[in-house]
Amino acid sequence: MQAQRNVANLLVVNSVAATAGMESNNIDAYISSMSTGESVIVSPGGIVVDATGTLPTEFKIATKLTDGTLQYSDTIKAKGIKTIHANKYVAPTNQIDYIGYNGSSGSFDVINSNIYSVKMYLKPTDVAGFMQQKIKEGFYETDSTATQQEIAKGLTDSLIKNFSREPDKKKFGTDRFVFERINSGAQANALGTATAALTKGSTAVVFSEDMTALVVAGTILRFGTSGAGTAPCYVVTGHDSGAAAARVYTLDIPYQGSSTTALAAGSVESVTEGNWGIKISSVTYYFDEPKFRYHQPIWETILQDCGSTVVTKSTKTTPGSGDYRQIKAMEQLFLGNEGNYYRAQIPQPVFRSEVSSSKTYAIVTIEHVDNFTDNLGGKADSLKQVYLACEKGNGGTYSDANTGLGTILNAYVTAYSIPLSYTTSATIATEINS
């Protein structure tokens, strides 16, 4: 959860055009003509600041809400600004591990009459998981003629079944952990121009053309791309007795990808036998602030009695910056500064939300000091923050030469020698769109 010092405000800004002619005029005359999410900087008296004119020593930032009103930040004293941080949008990443073959190297160590074990230590991501250690496992016992294919299938099948009873799976029908096999084998046949119909959780696959000569029991199929790598592979166990052009082929493990009626030709191929691996990927937990907060799966994959088989930690979990879920959580938190103290009560009230799940946001943070007189007559400093969640884009509300949010903030940075940090560009409007 985002921290705050004393008081913080969040304004959600959309990438829209700047309303013409506002500079040096009172904002009240332009509210109705402003676009939703348009942002403007005004003096304490409501006069729109002109970047090319005289900058007032104090200002507020206003953004038009969906209901047609303006939301204002606290008054910011230019000399009291400690720092301005401009951070472009950075996409979050979810963890990916590989067991055995990892897309470029590796394999399963084949051991006859052995019990292979995969343990996943799930790390807590919220208070409810504190002081707990949840461990999920997958097992497979080989026979006296073990193969990599057999081991990969056995472990994958066990992991899928053991994770099928997870709360998110039962409640929302979502697999938070996805288990798929990959193979290093080269393309055996491109399968012509055939497309494939696949359903998540089903072992059936139907091709748009007659595959009788190319797909038989034991054929390895790779779905999603062409050539060795990390695309999922399945083994055909047979087919029904239907018409050749509409024959239903059976996969050895239920399909774990997204359902599709026609996986494109060129993204389906048969594969020669190669080294096998298991890809373990993850999906962000269900989000519905404030009941279900923004959390991502994190775990440790440990192998037991798997010989020299290794785990490759391919991708780490990172929350990113400017994901809509982060912004929505901040928005809900800072509503408390507007008097909405009980935001998670049952039944849950409907609160203002200007965040869109279809957008990504850059975050501009202004840290400033508010000087005030305390109860004993002394002077005190209150450190505050204003967060601007700016939809990625090059809208004039950021870059207009007179009233652009980025243009004016950069003018204050220059005029008052304010420390500015950024990810890519010192020009704030450019940073928002980078």
Image (cartoon, helix red, strand yellow):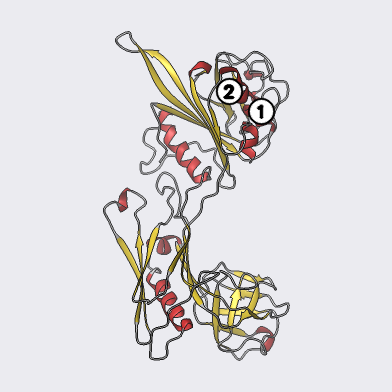
The kind of residue tagged 2 is: Val
Q: Residue at x 46, y 50 (%)?
A: 287
Nearer-the-camera pick, 65 or 74: 74
The kind of residue tagged 1 is: Met
**Left or right: where 386 falls relative to 263:** left
**Res. 220 image quadrant:** bottom right
**Res. 132 image quadrant:** bottom left
Work out which quarter of the rendered image holds the N terminus and state it: top left
Using the numbered discs, state the Cα–Cα distance from disc 1 to disc 2 in whole angstroms: 26 Å
The residue at which mark 2 appears reads as: 413
Mark 1, secondary structure of its residue: loop
Q: Position of residue 370 (x, y in %)?
A: 44, 18
Which label belongs to residue 331?
Answer: none
Q: Residues within 10 Å of mark 1 (few under 14, many from 20)?
A: many
**Left or right: where 285 falls relative to 393:** left
Mark 2, secondary structure of its residue: helix
* Residue farthest to the left, as pictured: 131
The image shows residue 284, relative to residue 397, as above or below, that is below
Q: Residues within 10 Å of mark 2 (few under 14, many from 20)?
A: some
Mark 2 or mark 1, which is nearer the start of the sequence? Answer: 1
Q: Position of residue 299 (x, y in %)?
A: 39, 60
Work out which quarter of the rendered image holds the C terminus and state it: top right
Q: Position of residue 137 (x, y in %)?
A: 35, 70
The residue at which mark 1 appears reads as: 34
The image shows residue 152, relative to residue 68, as above or below, that is below
Q: State whether residue 174 appears in this view.
A: no
Q: State whether residue 32 appears in this view.
A: yes
